[in-house]
Amino acid sequence: MIAVLTVGAVLILYSAVSGPLDRRSVTSAMAFVTVGFLIGPRALDLLHVSLESATVERVTELALVFLLFGDSARLDLGRLRREFGWPSRLLLIGLPLTMVAGFGAGLLVLPAIGLANAFLLSTMVCSTDAALGQRVVEDPAVPARVRQGLDVESGLNDGLAVPFFLVALDISMATLDRAVPAAVAREAASQIGWGVAAGVGVGALAGLIFRYSDKRGWLRGEWLQIFTLAVALTAWALAGALGGSGFIAAFVGGMAFGQVSRQHGPRVSYLTEQAGGLLAAIVWIGFGALAISRVLHDITWQVILYALISLTVVRMLPVALAMFHSGAARPTVAFLGWFGPRGLASVVFALLALERGIPQARTVLTTVTVTVALSVFLHGLTAAPLVAAYHRWYAAAQARRPTALTEATPTHMPRRPRRSHPGNPEEGLAVDAANP
C-alpha cells in the first residue's frame, strides 16, 4: 500500500503544477522519471516493488495496449492515404534502416552481446514515442506537414516494430540446433497471425456493433468511452488466449474499429487514451525508481556511446535517406531526424525480454534504460528551443519563396484530445488550422 500511496501522491502533486512545469519546458516524463528516482531504492526507498513483478509487467503492457489502440483508431486511413508520402517514407524506409543501423551499432560498440542480442536491442529502441514529442506535434509554429509526419510515424511504428521484436526475442532465446529456424518461424507466425486475427476480428465486429447501436441512439454518455476501452482490452486478451501478440492485436484492432465504426476522434477514444496516459505516467515513475536505480552500477562508456549513437546517427541517417528526393529542405530533414524520442514501447520490450530471461540481459536492459532516459531529457529539453529555431528558418524561407516550400502543403492532422481541454472530449479536437 505504501507504493500505491506514494504513486498517488506524486500524480496529485504533478497534476496541480502541470501547467507551470509545461510552460518551463518540463515534460511529464522528465518530472516522473526524476521523482521516481528520488523515491526509489537509491534515495528515499519508498517503492518496494520488484522490476520483474507481474504487476509492473501488466501495468506497462496495458499502457502500451491502450496507447497503441488509441493511436491507430485515430487514423482515418482513407484520408491519410492521400497524404501518406512523408509518413510512408519514415515508416517503410526509415524504420527498417534504423533497425539495420542499430544492429550494426550494437555489433560495433557492444560486441560481447552477440548477433542475436544486437538485433534484439535494435528492435527494442527503434520505435519512437509520440507522447515524449507532444510539444513538437502540437505546436502550430511547426508546419502541419512536419507535425503530421512525426505524429503518424510515432503512432504507427510501435505496432510495426512488434513483429520484428518478437522474432528477435525468439532468435535470442533459441538453442542452436537444426529445429531453430522452423521453431522461430512457427512462433513468429503464431504471434503475428493470431494477433492480427484477434485485432481484426474484435475491432471489426465491435465497429459494426457500435455503428448499429449508435445509429439507433442506444449508446449514451460515458458508455461511448467504456465501449472503446473494452474493445482494446478484448482484442488484447483474445490474442493472448490464442497465443498471439496482444500488442499487434491492439494496434490492428484500433485501425479495424476506427475504419468500420467510422469514428476517429475523442468522442469514442478519449477514455482509452487517457487510461493509457495514466498508466504511462505510472510506468515513468516506476522507470525512474526501479529501472534506473537498478542499472546504475552496470553503466559503462560503451552503453552511453550506444545510447548517444542510437539517438543521433542511428535515427538521423535513416531519416535522411528516407526523405531523399522528398522535397523537404535540409533543416526539415534534420528536425524530423532529431525528434524521434524513445519511450514507452522500448520500456515494455525491455521488461518482456527481462521476463523471458534473455542472454546478456543486464547489458541489454542497461542499454535500453540509458537510451530511454537520455531521450526523455534530451528531447524534452531541446523541444522548445529547436521548435523556435526551426520556426524562424521556416518563416524566413516562406517569405523568400512562399509557393516553393514543400513543407507549406496543407495537410490533415489526426485528431487527438488537446491538453488544454482535459475534461471535455467533445471540445478536444486538435485539427490543423489550415485544414479544419
Image (spheres, rainbow, N blue to C red):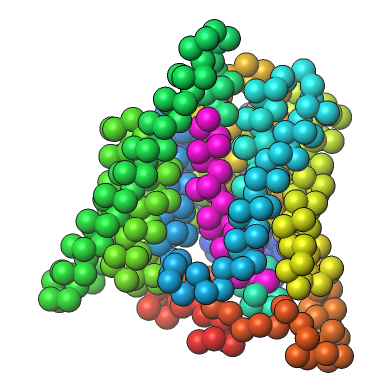
Where does the image place residue 238, in percent across and percent down from the top left?
Answer: 28, 39
Please tell me whether residue 116 is drawn above or below residue 395 in the rendered image.
Answer: above
Horizontal arrangement in the rendering, residue 302 relative to residue 30 (left or right): right
Whether the magenta-drawn stretch holds residue 161 is answered as yes
Please tell me whether residue 316 is drawn above or below residue 142 in the rendered image.
Answer: above
Q: Which residue is drawn at 42% across and 80% down?
A: 427
Question: Looking at the magenta stretch, what is its main secondary structure?
Answer: helix
The span shown in magenta is 146-167
| Residue nearer the viewer, 175 or 280 | 175
Q: Residue at x 80, y 51 (%)?
A: 317
Q: Which residue is drawn at 76% across and 71% down?
A: 328
Q: In which quarter of the image is residue 248?
A: top left
Where does the image place residue 382, in percent across and percent down from the top left?
Answer: 79, 61
Where does the image place residue 22, in percent across and percent down from the top left?
Answer: 66, 67
Q: In which quarter of the image is residue 226?
A: bottom left
Horizontal arrangement in the rendering, residue 138 relative to residue 325 (left or right): left
Can residue 381 be seen in the rendering of this structure?
no
Please tell me whether residue 407 is drawn above or below residue 369 in the rendered image.
Answer: below
